[in-house]
Amino acid sequence: MAYYLLLINMDHNNLLSNESSVSSMNKLIVENKRILDQSNLQSQLLTIIKDLIVKNGYVSRKENCKNPFNKYGRKCFSQTDEDGITFEIIKRLNIKKGSYAEYGVGDGLENNTILLAALGWKGFWVGGEDLNFKYKPSSKFNYSKNWITLDNILEITKKNLKKMNIKNLDVISLDLDGNDFHFTKKLLENKINPKLFIVEYNPKFFPPIEFIMKYNQFHNWLLDDNYGASLESFNKLFKDHDYKLICCNSHTGSNAFFIKEEFKKDFEETPEDINDIFMEPNFDLACKYGHFTSSEVVENIFSKK
């Protein structure tokens, strides 16, 4: 069993053609078999097989997208492939060190804007949980722990913009598992209109279905289908504010990327038909593979001056 466990993690061609690799592998098996019982090995093997299936499924979805822009998707700190899409967009927009805001950040270890902080951007987060890393408010980063409602989202935003000395945001990411449409609409109607706006859509409702969850300031997501809004509904909202839909992430089919209409010439390969951009949900592919993000790494990023 241990032999197959190691075999999966090694390059087959190099393994079979390199005697030293075989020798090293056998030595490792001998050294570890005293502490690894059969049930533990089986569990590890099943985890590895599952991860390989997940990764192959993601690659397949990515390669078969009708939208050529999906090829840029990759993960660094985001939940899945959002980081690569974000990076390609800001590169085309020629934003070197911009500003960001993220609403709904969990414990702070898996977010769409950590990448931007790592690139030297400044910005702020708003969320309802304690962050899982140590930080000090600075000229580059601030965290506001608040339960967001329609009554306070503008006040919280304006206070943070003033505190961070930000006139116009370059990127907003909003993922609150509930009233997302209503909060997005409130920001846009009050001229909070970044160059790139990332929102979580409800992929159960494919185009042209319109769905918007009724506003409920006390809403807690119960892992059901009552949250957010359909891609069609979000697209109509953003069109009304001069935005263009560029991409939906291919890994899970849950995040949509909208840019200001004035920049559409830099994204000519993006399809015009929303059906060619929409991604079906595939939350089975949301499980983890690779290394987990540590609180130490994120703390290191946000401690930079």
Image: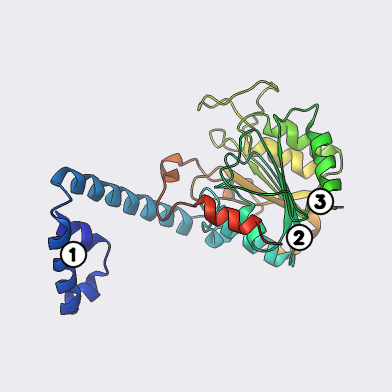
CA separation, marks 3 and 2? 12 Å
Let me know if residue 130 appears in the view: yes
Disc 3 marks a residue whose amino acid type is Met
Give the left or right position of residue 115, taking residue 80 as reference. right
Residue at (57% x, 33% y) in the render: 205
Q: Which residue is mark 2?
A: 98
Relative to 234, does residue 151 appear above or below in the rendering? above
**Marks 1,2: beta carbons within 8 A:** no
* Comparing labels 1 and 2, the label whose residue is closer to the camera: 1
Q: Which mark is residue 256?
A: none
Q: Does 26 sit above or below residue 259?
A: below
Distance in Å between CA atoms under marks 1 and 3:
53 Å
Residue at 67% across / 61% down in the picture? 304
Where is mark 3, residue-wise?
164
- Amino acid carrying label 1: it is Leu
Q: Nearer the viewer, residue 193 or 242?
A: 193
Q: Amino acid at mark 2?
A: Gly
Earlier sequence position, callout 1 versus callout 2: 1
Tell me the crowding category of disc 2: few under 14, some 14 to 19, or many 20 or more residues within 10 angstroms, Cα based.
Answer: some
Residue at numbered disc 1: 28
CA neighbours of label 3 inside 10 A, class few (<14), some (14 to 19), many (20+): some
State the image coordinates of residue 168 (x, y, percent, origin top left): 84, 52
**Residue at the image point whose x is 83% and y is 47% from the top:** 163
Q: Pick whichever, 221 or 57, lies toward us.
A: 221
Q: Could you say whether the residue bearing mark 2 is in a helix, strand or loop? A: loop
